[in-house]
Image (cartoon, helix red, strand yellow):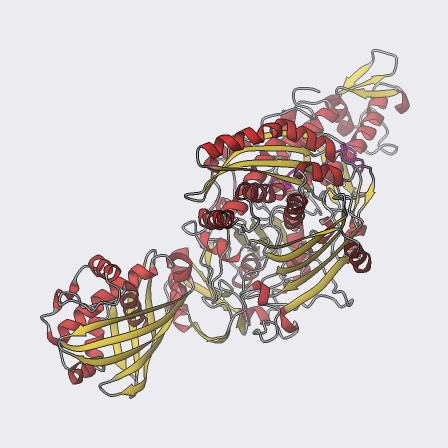
């Protein structure tokens, strides 16, 4: 089953710093929930392992992640696919772009992802929620890495959803790292989890 | 009629065992030292298998073996040869190939078994499965049925261009075109018959053991037809020759058709047990059942009905695209053709019918027979379009049906079948009275006063069952004969064992077969046994499906009982010192005509075995007879079901308020069991109509693979059903039986949808008519009314 998610996060750091963080496997590994390893395998490739639980399905995903369309300090496309063994597979890509804003850097992403096998069979109703919660965790951690303080970003998911519902497209207040629908976060986060 | 004889509602002998947990199912079978099988399944709908790395799995704790498609190919195991060959319009045979028992080179649906891990425990097998690494080359899948045969779609099999299995047709195109040319009115309807999952209560299971001493493989399996399974496993799947293979089906918890077929997992267990010389057990997890049990229905159709100015049906034209899934299966191509197209005359006298069916491959699990198999699809189509036609020309739907019913028998339809007997008007009249059709106007008004929409829908179905005359089956492309065999073994003490190839998996054979034997031989019900697992003692039989175990199976028993009676009379003649011709048999007693000299059945049995009273050279000792019964015709159960329901237009929730069924099953052996079958069948069909749908997304992922997402009907979805019968005895078998196991599931979907469309006042309602679909349709209807 396929899904798309789009969203933005405002990070309290300049573009060069955010860009460096986006390319630092150690930072990404620390930010991706369940990520057990993320190792560079080439200039633009990583091997990743992440443990994810989606409803009744728990799996260790192993896979590869590649960066393409790289424009330093502006953005890249990150593509990943992972096999979760008997749990199925997940794959997807996210276009990530950075822009200067007053508070630092706005990170925008469009994600397309799909899952198959047991995850789709048993977890399809839960994937949105799981992805969202993973995205929340990812950006909370990433924001912390990018400058720490803004961490109230770890605002409960429900709040972010409510905010998004009330003011679709509105930019995030200082308290919320994520500005748009939960979709994007969960996708991102879920997507990141696909990497192995 | 005695309290336990034919026609008595005897309580089911087997139920005590079932409801007290004493049944003996395949999962209850355990063998010393048995290993467990876990099947690794494809998460992709369509992909190449580029590499399987089993090294880590083989080192995993408890692992005995890992087998893949390459092993199956090397051992030539698996073929999936379908039991029926359908030919296209141009005379060419359907496009099928053979396949190993584990996917090799390519996977074709989500759930396709790629490898089997065999380990000391199931948990260890599963853990090792996690360590199997399969590299897939993902291909674009074919999922959408209507577009599957369009040019430019990915090709699933290289021998089936445009994913087409066959382009079949039946009936006469020219005469049908002529009928439409002179029609005063043409009704058109597009229909989708939703894909369903059979959901037997007991999942499939297998315990395979190999005895190296005798070189015999014994497979305990959840089969509706263990003998057919043995033939297929032996002759086509290459597991072992028939005399070295025992297939045992003990108690089986429901099948609904899905356990007719011979599946990869059972084949693999039998093969692997010999290969590793160790017993192997496999029991499907529920999600494996959803993924791999053959699904049912799944048609997209366009139908047109031609009427003259008086509302007489002149012709029917149908084009159907039928989903057959990715792989051939056992009945498969016969279902949307010979079990569908030839039923399209329904209960109606239609001079001209032409039906085309395109069978297509998709990257989904095989579609095969599920309760009714083709006949529900035919009934849904004809009963929906008849209802729509009546509404369009402003005739009462009941009267429109009455006017067009076949009224004289035998009746030759333009689509092969010849109906032998029936009384469709009588069933309709009885149903109308029971349903208080006259009062519907007042009930609709009462509902409207509460803000609800009330509708009434009819379904006048017919089915061809009692499968089936072997010559006809052969002429239509069937690979086997569909006779049945029976053996009646009278023991020395006068107890009786009945053996047939008709396996019971919930139908109550132990009771009904005993009723037949007990009433024929005049002996108590209790001393007659019919153990389902005893099918292993039967040399050959064809199994239970197509409502055949009464009409065909019991006819075979009846024929064997004729022979028992004849032989017993000879024995009685010797014992009573009278000539055989002077012996009368009645109520369990053999009497010398005109005298009071008599002997009971049990004593005759004893004498047959002691053989003291006759010359063993002139009359063989023993009392055991075998018969094969091949029916002369299909049987034609028919009836009228009326569904009355209420819709809450605010929520789209449908509440079935009344259900009336008047069926003609010919003679009834046990009316209580018949009524139970009707209940089960009706609710099965209500499930299809209101809630059940197998849903594959565009990537071929099955999103309805558990009870979280696949909705089954429950007791509170239906009211108490009003079930009655009429009786026109079937002329083609000795008991006058027609069969009742599928009727409800065949009849009910169109009755529900006809009632919903009646309530809403427009036809655009698809199955399953979930609250969302009904709510949308209600909104559309309201908008349309407002615009007018």
Residue B303 at x, y percent in the picture: 67, 55
The prevailing secondary structure element of the residues shown in magenta is loop
Q: Return the residue nearer the eye: B449 or B516.
A: B449
Q: Is residue A114 magenta?
A: no
- The number of numbered badges drawn on the structure is 0
Q: Quadrant of residue B177?
A: bottom right
Evaluate whether residue B670 shows in this view.
Answer: no
Q: Return the residue nearer the eye: B755 or B333.
A: B755
Q: Which residue is farthest front?
A: B788
Evaluate whether residue A57 shows in this view.
Answer: yes
Residue at 80% across, 35% down: B731
Q: Is residue B532 left or right of residue B170?
A: left
Q: Is residue B732 magenta?
A: yes
Q: Is residue B670 above or below residue B411?
A: above
Q: Is residue B788 left or right of residue B724?
A: left
Q: Quadrant of residue B88?
A: bottom right
Q: Quadrant of residue B146?
A: bottom right
Residue B419 at x, y percent in the picture: 79, 42
Q: Is residue B443 above or below residue B224?
A: above
Residue at 80% across, 49% down: B351
Residue at 37% across, 58% down: A123
Residue B714 at x, y percent in the picture: 47, 39
Q: Which residue is farthest top?
A: B596
Q: Is residue B449 above or below residue A134?
A: above
Per the rendered image, the range of residues in magenta is: B729-744
Q: Is residue B307 left or right of residue B670?
A: right
Q: Is residue B336 left or right of residue B105?
A: right
- Quadrant (top left, top right, bottom left, bottom right) of the N terminus of chain B: top right
Residue B322 at x, y percent in the picture: 63, 59
């Amino acid at each position: 089953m396929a899904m798309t998610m789009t969203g933005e996060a405002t990070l309290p750091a300049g573009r060069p710093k955010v860009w460096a963080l986006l390319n630092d496997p150690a930072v990404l590994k620390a930010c991706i929930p369940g990520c057990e390893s993320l190792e560079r395998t080439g200039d633009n490739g990583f091997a990743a392992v992440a443990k994810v639980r989606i409803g009744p399905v728990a799996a260790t995903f192993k896979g590869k992640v590649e960066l393409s369309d790289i424009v330093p300090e502006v953005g890249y496309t990150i593509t990943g696919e992972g096999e979760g063994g008997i749990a199925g597979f997940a794959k997807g890509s996210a276009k990530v772009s950075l822009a200067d804003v007053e508070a630092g850097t706005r990170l925008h992403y469009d994600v397309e992802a799909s899952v198959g096998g047991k995850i789709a069979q048993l977890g399809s109703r839960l994937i949105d929620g799981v992805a969202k919660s993973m995205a929340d965790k990812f950006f909370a951690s990433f924001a912390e890495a990018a400058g720490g303080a803004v961490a109230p970003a770890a605002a409960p998911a429900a709040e972010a959803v409510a905010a998004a519902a009330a003011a679709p497209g509105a930019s995030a207040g200082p308290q919320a790292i994520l500005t748009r629908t939960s979709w994007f976060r969960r996708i991102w986060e879920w997507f990141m989890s696909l990497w192995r | 009629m005695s309290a336990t004889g034919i026609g008595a509602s005897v309580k089911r002998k087997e139920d005590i065992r079932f409801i007290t947990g004493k049944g003996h199912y395949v999962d209850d079978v355990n063998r010393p030292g048995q290993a467990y099988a876990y099947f690794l399944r494809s998460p992709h709908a369509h992909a190449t298998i580029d590499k399987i790395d089993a090294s880590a799995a083989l080192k995993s704790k408890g692992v005995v073996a890992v087998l893949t498609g390459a092993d199956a190919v090397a051992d030539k195991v698996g073929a999936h040869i379908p039991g029926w060959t359908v030919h296209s319009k141009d005379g060419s045979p359907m496009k099928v190939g053979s396949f190993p028992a584990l996917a090799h080179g390519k996977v074709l649906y989500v759930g396709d078994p790629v490898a089997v891990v065999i380990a000391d425990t199931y948990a260890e097998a599963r853990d090792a499965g996690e360590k199997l690494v399969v590299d897939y080359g993902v291909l674009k899948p074919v999922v959408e049925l209507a577009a599957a045969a369009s040019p430019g779609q990915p090709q699933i099999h290289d021998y089936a261009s445009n994913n087409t299995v066959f382009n079949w047709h039946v009936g006469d195109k020219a005469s049908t075109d002529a009928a439409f040319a002179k029609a005063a009115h043409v009704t058109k309807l597009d229909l989708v018959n939703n894909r369903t999952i059979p959901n037997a209560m007991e999942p499939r299971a297998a315990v395979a053991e190999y005895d190296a001493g005798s070189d015999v493989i014994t497979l305990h399996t959840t089969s509706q037809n263990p003998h057919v399974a043995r033939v297929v496993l032996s002759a086509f799947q290459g597991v072992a020759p028939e005399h070295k293979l025992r297939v045992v089906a003990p108690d089986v918890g429901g099948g609904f058709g899905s356990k007719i077929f011979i599946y990869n997992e059972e084949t693999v267990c039998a093969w692997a047990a010999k290969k590793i010389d160790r017993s192997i057990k496999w029991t499907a997890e529920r999600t494996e059942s959803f993924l791999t049990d053959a699904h049912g229905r799944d048609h997209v159709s366009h139908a047109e009905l031609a009427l003259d100015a008086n509302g007489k049906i002149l012709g029917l034209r149908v084009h159907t695209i039928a989903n057959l899934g990715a792989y051939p299966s056992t009945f498969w191509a016969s279902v949307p053709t010979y079990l569908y197209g030839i039923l399209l005359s329904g209960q109606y006298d239609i001079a001209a019918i032409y039906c085309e069916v395109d069978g297509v491959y998709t990257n989904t699990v095989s579609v095969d027979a599920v309760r009714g198999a083709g006949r529900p699809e035919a009934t849904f189509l004809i009963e929906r379009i008849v209802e729509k036609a009546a509404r369009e020309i402003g005739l009462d739907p009941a009267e429109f049906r009455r006017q067009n019913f076949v009224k004289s028998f035998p009746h030759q339809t333009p689509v092969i079948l010849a109906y032998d007997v029936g009384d469709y008007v009588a069933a309709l009249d009885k149903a109308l009275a029971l349903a208080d059709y006259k009062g519907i106007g007042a009930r609709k008004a009462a509902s409207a006063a509460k803000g609800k929409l009330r509708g009434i829908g009819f379904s006048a179905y017919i089915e061809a069952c009692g499968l089936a005359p072997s010559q006809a089956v052969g002429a239509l492309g069937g690979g086997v004969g569909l006779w049945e065999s029976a053996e009646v073994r009278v023991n020395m003490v006068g107890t009786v064992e009945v053996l047939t190839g008709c396996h019971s998996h919930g139908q109550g054979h132990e009771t009904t077969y005993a009723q037949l034997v007990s009433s024929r031989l005049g002996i108590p019900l209790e001393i007659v046994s019919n153990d389902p697992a005893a099918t292993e003692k039967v040399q050959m039989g064809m199994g239970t499906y197509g409502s055949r175990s009464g009409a065909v199976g019991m006819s075979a028993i009846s024929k064997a009982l004729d022979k028992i009676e004849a032989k017993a009379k000879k024995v009685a003649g010797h014992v009573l010192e009278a000539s055989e011709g002077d012996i009368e048999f009645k109520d369990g007693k053999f009497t010398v005509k005109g005298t009071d000299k008599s002997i009971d059945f049990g004593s005759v049995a004893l004498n047959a075995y002691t053989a003291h009273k006759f010359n063993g050279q002139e009359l063989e000792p023993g009392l055991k007879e075998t018969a094969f019964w091949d029916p002369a015709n299909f049987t034609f159960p028919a009836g009228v079901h009326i569904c009355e329901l209420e819709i809450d237009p605010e929520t789209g929730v449908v509440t079935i308020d009344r259900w009336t069924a008047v069926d003609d099953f010919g003679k009834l052996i046990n009316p209580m069991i018949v009524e139970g079958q009707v209940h089960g069948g009706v609710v099965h069909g209500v499930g299809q109509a209101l809630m059940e749908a197998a849903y594959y997304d565009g990537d071929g992922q099955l999103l309805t693979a558990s009870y979280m997402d696949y909705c089954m009907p429950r007791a509170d979805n239906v009211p108490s059903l009003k079930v009655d019968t009429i009786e026109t005895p079937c002329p083609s078998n000795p008991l006058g039986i027609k069969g009742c196991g599928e009727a409800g599931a065949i009849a009910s979907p169109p009755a529900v949808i006809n009632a919903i469309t009646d309530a809403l006042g427009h036809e655009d309602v698809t199955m399953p008519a979930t609250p969302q679909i009904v709510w949308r349709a209600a909104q559309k209807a309201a908008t349309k009314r407002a615009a007018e």
